[in-house]
Image: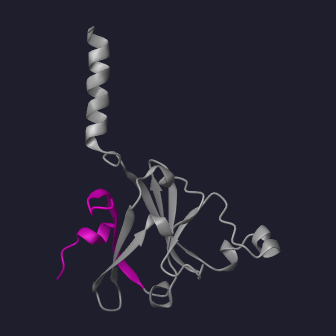
Amino acid sequence: MPLRPRIALLAALAATAAGPLSALTIRQVSTRDYSEEALTTISEIASGCESTGSRTYLRTDPAQKAGRYFIVDLDEAVSELPTGCSLLLEIIRGSDGLTEPLALPFSAATGSMGRALFVGLTDEAHSAETILAWRLTVRDATGREHAEAHSFLWEMPAE
């Protein structure tokens, strides 16, 4: 077998052995507060059904829109991720300084399944809460971590 086909075969085997999420990267995370009105489209008012446009939403309370959102930019589409993936959002609250984990399965997401996730803290317990630090982790069905991003304060030592 000539050298080039052998190299291509070895590269293909290495890529499949690494698994489907081995190269997943969280490119950027930003936060923003959204009101109910800001997330309601004209077509939604006319039809009565939520129109997500080109956005993919994960919310702590799927029935509520308003709240603080983490906009998570991935390097691949959510629809390309294997079944059973979830996002673990850990927050350190300003009220008590405790770390609280929130697990959000991608199967609960609504929308286009693009490359950005809008992760909303929309339930009453979290929407008005002051967040000191946060960490986001993408996990597969077995719990293995594939991508992680965190705020600057997440790494600060506790005093």
User: Residue 16 appears at what percent x and percent y?
Assistant: 31, 37
Residue 5 appears at what percent x and percent y? Answer: 31, 15
In this picture, is 26 found above or below 99?
A: above
Say which of 139 and 153 sits in front: 139
Q: Give the residue at x 79% y 75%.
A: 45
* Residue at image location 38% in from the left, 65% down from the top: 86
Q: Residue at x 74, y 70 (%)?
A: 41
Quadrant where the image shows the C terminus: bottom left
Residue 153 painted magenta: yes
Quadrant position of residue 140 = bottom left
Above or below, 24 relative to 143: above
Foreground pick, 112 / 158: 112
Q: Position of residue 154 (x, y in %)?
A: 28, 71
Colour mapping used in the image: one colour
Residue furthest to the top in view is: 2
**Magenta span of residues:** 130-159
| Image quarter of the N terminus | top left
Q: Residue at x 27, y 19 (%)?
A: 7
Q: Nearer the viewer, residue 60 or 15?
A: 15
Left or right of residue 69: residue 39: right
- Looking at the rendered structure, the number of numbered marks drawn on it comes to 0
Residue 134 among those drawn in magenta: yes
Image location (x, y in percent) of residue 2: 27, 8
